[in-house]
Amino acid sequence: MNTHAFHFRGTQLHALPSGALFWPDQRLLVVSDLHLGKCARLVANGGAMLPPYDTVETLSRLDADLDATGAGEVVCLGDSFDSVEAGATLPEEAELWLTRMQAGRSWLWIEGNHDPGPVGIGGTHAAEARRGPLVFRHIATRDGFGEVSGHYHPKARLALRGRSISRACFLVDACRLIMPAYGAYTGGLWTSNAALSGLMEPGAQAILTGPKPLAVPMPR
């Protein structure tokens, strides 16, 4: 499996090309900011007439990552649904797809700012959760030692082999790990933004998603 392995707070983790995180010792797959139902919500609110393929693409990616890793447990780090209403009105085929992926697995929905309450889909719900030295929550905190979070949708821009590239990325330092957005139709925040550059320590790395995950010093 094409991943970037790294150590964080005494654990060995793998950054996947898709933006998922795998903890092999726990058979635990972590994803953040799926924003399921986003295109449907935009259309319902009078936005651009976008085909609702984002949910299918996101669930396809998640299904493939579950098969590739053999994960027995999944943690979704909040904003899994673009709104509470989007979670409640997810197409039947998407609900059935999620139900099939949940079968035989432990599945935890962490609450996000877009989906602050439980939705009527299987799994358990929590504001945050601790597993060994790691704490899973949606939004990073200033004193979040061992924290794995999402929310910011980080993306990096850098020159590589004479050309400029931009990719969604993981951010990691000695204290915290911020996940990229996993959803197919999500924007991002540049790593140079004060919200991220002020949060991450000077030695932070960015792990770029894409065909081959690549770790570089965090662009500031």
Image (spheres, grey):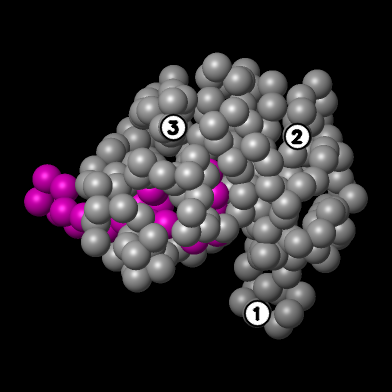
- Circle 3 SS class: loop
Q: Residue furthest bottom?
A: 46
- Front position in the image: 109 or 201: 201
In the displayed structure, would residue 13 be above or below residue 191?
above
Residue underneath mark 2: 107
Q: Are discs 3 and 1 less than 8 Å apart at CB?
A: no
Can residue 127 be seen in the rendering of this structure?
yes
Q: Picture coordinates of residue 58 (x, y %)? A: 62, 46
List x then y, in percent, for residue 87.
80, 57
Q: Name the residue under label 1.
A: 47
Amino acid type, label 1: Gly
Instruction: Report the span colored magenta.
Output: 148-171
Q: Where is residue 141 in the image (x, y as percent from the top left)?
A: 52, 58
**Residue 118: image x %, image y %?**
84, 54
Q: In this view, does 94 lie to the left or right of 201?
A: right
For the point 40% across and 68% down, which residue is it?
195
Residue that numbered label 3 is attached to: 9
Residue 18 forms part of the magenta stretch: no
The answer to whether the residue labelled 2 contacts the one labelled 1, judged by CB atoms less than 8 Å apart, is no
Q: Distance between the residues labelled 2 and 3?
A: 23 Å
Q: Which residue is drawn at 74% across and 61% down?
A: 115
